[in-house]
Image (cartoon, rainbow, N blue to C red):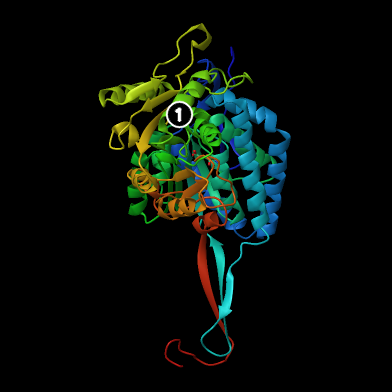
């Protein structure tokens, strides 16, 4: 692109440059071309945005939830009407194939409908009081100004998972999207503004983590932080939130496993493994990066997996024949190559892939072959650490028990799956796998928006997004007692 478009922050309903005048480039990972120029904001811009959100909160929290939801419904309709161009821009900035970018926009649409529906629910409880002539209930109240830091891999869906429930609950928002893919978030925020959100209810500040993100987390005017990203940064976010006792929602790493038992439908398991491992170029926190396969079907499964992985068409995600796009940036590209070296040093067998693609068709992009390591021991680093790329480790197992043990032997606990025709073993695995998401006869990716999303152990801090679980993140419970007896009644005492 010769004249890349210059984008701005949204603060107090106005599109403004960073106060320091700095900018950064958003580049297409498939071609290296500049997709747009964005404000490289810092603490000053964060402060303006937080102040705008705090001011808007005074009114927004008093707007009836069904009215708030009407604006959400309008935004969702606009997302639907613009779905194709939004998906194209997403592929341009982030690289995933168009089919998946459409899915990302669709996930935002789904979340919007669900959360807009909550405008007429947001249920609390009514419950008997222990004393006569006394009424007891609980209601959801908003939390205040929410600060969101979102990743590049689902550049519209993940902002929507946080923004829609936060808004319907009556909170106001400052969001800092990942510097690698801010355009999709920009489009999303623009639609929310066009749909009629009052100025200051939603504020967009683009920039880098250390400059803008850290300032958002540290700002005393922000009551809640929701962060999706790496476990290492998540830990820093949690520590910073602790200083002000902020509510802190974290969605962090994964090292997800597909277990394939000897009675599995192997065609189905292979299709699932391929999609789970190489969909979004392995750049999902739900990606299947370990395949634990029963010894009786191990050789056949591996041979067929390698054959199919080698046949994947890798290239620019705008080409409809392409099945896997590039990695997001040079760091991720190099990280994947380093992990291939680590796997080789650990004596895992490179069954296919393992190289960057540097031929004429792939110049300018961060393309890497679909890579399968075989004979992997579950203690190896490639079987323990999150790679976030198109690299999968195949591990042999003896039975269900050993598969579960291997499955659970990592620091993370996001998603797991099992392929079997035996309902007993499927239920045992469902109970025993220590993850927040579990699938039977489906891969580890593909969560739907009306169920809780999140994980155990190093994947987070126990909170969940999506579904009604998200409402618990974005609202404060208030317990209310109304005594109409006309006298002092002492709970626990006047029995
Ligand atoms: C992520 O990888 O950060 O379940 C989110 C899935 C998608 C969401 C992934 N619906 O794979």
Q: Which residue is mark 1?
A: 300
Q: Residue 340's x, y, as percent?
A: 34, 23
Q: Is residue 476 above or below residue 415?
A: below
Horizontal side of 495 relative to 140 (left or right) equals left
Q: Is residue 11 above or below residue 31?
A: below
Q: Residue at x 61, y 20 (%)?
A: 318
Q: Residue 51's x, y, as percent?
A: 50, 47
Horizontal side of 341 relative to 318 (left or right) equals left
Q: Residue 426's x, y, as percent?
A: 48, 50
Q: Residue at x 57, y 78 (%)?
A: 127
Viewer-proximal residue among 444 and 412: 444
Q: Residues within 10 Å of mark 1 (few under 14, many from 20)?
A: few
Residue 304 in view here: yes
Viewer-proximal residue among 431 and 307: 307
- The part of the image, by quadrant, that contains residue 288 is top left
Q: Is residue 369 above or below residue 468?
A: above
Residue 43 in view here: no
Most extreme residue toward the top, as rendered? 360
């Amino acid at each position: 692109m010769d004249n890349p478009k210059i984008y701005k922050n949204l603060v107090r309903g106005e599109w403004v440059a960073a106060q320091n005048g700095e900018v950064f480039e958003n580049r297409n990972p498939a071609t290296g071309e500049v997709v747009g120029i964005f404000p490289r904001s810092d603490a000053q811009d964060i402060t303006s945005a937080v102040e705008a959100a705090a001011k808007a909160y005074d009114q927004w929290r008093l707007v009836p939830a069904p009215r708030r939801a009407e604006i959400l419904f309008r935004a969702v309709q606009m997302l639907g009407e613009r779905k194709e161009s939004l998906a194209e821009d997403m592929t341009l900035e982030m690289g995933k194939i168009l089919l998946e970018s459409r899915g990302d926009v669709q996930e935002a649409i789904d979340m919007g409908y669900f959360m807009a529906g909550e405008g007429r629910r947001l249920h609390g409880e009514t419950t008997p009081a222990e004393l006569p002539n006394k009424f007891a209930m609980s209601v959801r109240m908003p939390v205040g100004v929410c600060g969101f830091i979102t990743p590049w891999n689902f550049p519209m869906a993940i902002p929507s998972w946080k923004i829609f429930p936060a808004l319907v609950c009556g909170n106001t928002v400052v969001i800092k999207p990942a510097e690698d893919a801010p355009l999709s978030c920009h489009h999303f925020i623009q639609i929310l503004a066009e749909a009629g959100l009052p100025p200051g209810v939603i504020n967009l500040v683009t920039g880098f983590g250390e400059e803008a993100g850290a300032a958002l987390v540290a700002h005393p005017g922000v009551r809640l932080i929701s962060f999706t990203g790496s476990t290492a940064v998540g830990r820093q976010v949690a520590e910073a939130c602790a200083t002000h006792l902020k509510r802190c929602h974290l969605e962090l790493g994964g090292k997800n496993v597909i277990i394939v038992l000897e009675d599995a439908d192997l065609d189905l398991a292979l299709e699932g493994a391929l999609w789970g491992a190489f969909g979004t170029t392995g750049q999902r926190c739900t990606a299947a990066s370990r395949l634990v396969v029963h010894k009786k079907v191990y050789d056949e499964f591996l041979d067929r997996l390698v054959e199919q992985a080698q046949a994947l068409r890798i290239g620019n995600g705008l080409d409809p024949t392409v099945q896997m796009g590039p990695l997001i940036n040079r760091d991720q590209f190099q990280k994947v190559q380093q992990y291939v070296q680590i796997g080789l040093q650990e004596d895992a067998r490179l069954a296919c892939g393992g190289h960057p693609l540097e031929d004429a068709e792939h110049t300018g992009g961060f393309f890497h072959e679909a890579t399968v390591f075989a004979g992997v021991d579950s203690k190896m680093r490639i079987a323990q650490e999150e790679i976030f790329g198109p690299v999968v480790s195949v591990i042999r197992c003896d039975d269900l028990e050993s598969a579960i043990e291997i499955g659970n032997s990592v620091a993370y606990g996001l998603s797991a799956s099992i392929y079997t025709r035996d309902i007993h073993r499927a239920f045992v695995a469902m109970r025993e796998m220590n993850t927040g998401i579990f699938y039977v006869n489906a891969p580890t990716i593909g969560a739907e928006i009306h169920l809780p999303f999140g994980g155990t152990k190093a994947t987070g801090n126990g909170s969940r997004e999506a579904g009604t679980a998200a409402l618990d993140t974005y609202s404060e419970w208030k317990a209310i007692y109304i005594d109409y007896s006309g006298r002092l009644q002492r709970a626990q005492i006047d029995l």
